[in-house]
Amino acid sequence: MAPLLRFLLLMLAPIAVQAQEVDVKLVIAVDASGSVDPTELRLQVNGIADAMRTDAVQNAVRAGLQQTISVAVLIWSDAAYPKYPTEWHLLSSPDTFEAFAKEVELYNVSAPGVPAIGGGGTNIGDALVYAISMLDENPARAPRWVVDISGDGPESDPWAKGALKLPAARTIADSRAVIVNGLAIETDVPDLTQYYRENVITGPGSFAIRARDFQDYKRAIVDKLLRELSAVPLAMK
């Protein structure tokens, strides 16, 4: 084969795209069940957006080996209701944090085209399985896959027939080496943090943090993110 032809064929050959390496892939799963009113959902959404704008969280990301994380938010309630995930975002520079914060702020119970946000039972297991599927579909490579589950109550019986509950969902998380952390909002259930520790969280180093109420969510999510982002690095997967 002539050298020029060989060169042209090489130039036209498909180029293998290497998956982005990040320090963590994170799904922040937000409770929008029937016990959460529009103001309370807005406090969670704004709390996440504000957390992403803090110097502390941005500096924690930049302190990682890759100085980048991949993150998405998931709005959930009962398996009988739709889920509302954001797009995945790679966070590294101030501009990327701001873009993600602005997308998160779009979520509210009166958003056009999403009338089903809010309502239904608290089907934590179904939300967890959905979040795990999001992690699986994200092509980025990371040493840690994490799901944050926040909510104001224990899991209720699903309205949707056959929906997975927490015991089965935690088994799936363990089989996929997914770390599940919890943020218990103790507005209605005073011992909810203990419930989360016993029934929701799983995986090496997993933990649950308490928010006194929805107004305290912003403080709690910042503390939670800083703890997650400071975890000891593991091998990429």
Image: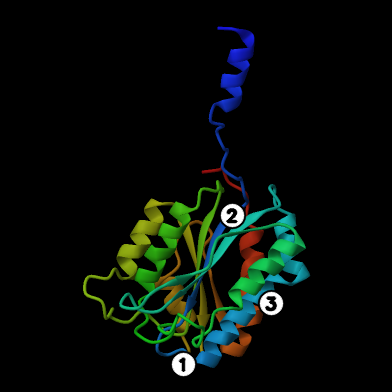
Nearer-N-terminus badge (1/2): 2
Q: Nearer the viewer, mark 1 or mark 3?
A: 3
Residue under the image location 60 percent in, 82 percent down: 217
Residue type highlighted by circle 2: Val
- Please give the label number shown on residue 188: 1
- Please give the label number shown on residue 50: 3
Q: Nearer the viewer, residue 106 or 93?
A: 106
Colouring scheme applied when the structure was drawn: rainbow
Question: Image check: 137 left or right of 230?
Answer: left
Residue 235, position as x, y percentages in the image? 56, 42
Residue 211 showing in the rendered view: no
Residue under the image location 46 percent in, 78 percent down: 194
Q: Residues within 10 Å of mark 2 (few under 14, many from 20)?
A: many
Whether label 1 touches label 3, CB < 8 Å: no
Residue 166, position as x, y percentages in the image? 34, 69
Q: Residues within 10 Å of mark 3 (few under 14, many from 20)?
A: many
Question: Image check: 143 left or right of 151?
Answer: right
The residue most toward the top is 1
Q: Residues within 10 Å of mark 1 (few under 14, many from 20)?
A: few
Residue 94 showing in the rendered view: yes
Nearer-N-terminus badge (2/3): 2
Q: Which residue is mark 2?
A: 24
Marks 1 and 2, Cα distance to the nearest angstrom?
32 Å
Q: Nearer the viewer, mark 1 or mark 2?
A: 2
Whether label 1 touches label 2, CB < 8 Å: no
The correct choice, above or below, for 173 with respect to 114 in the image is above
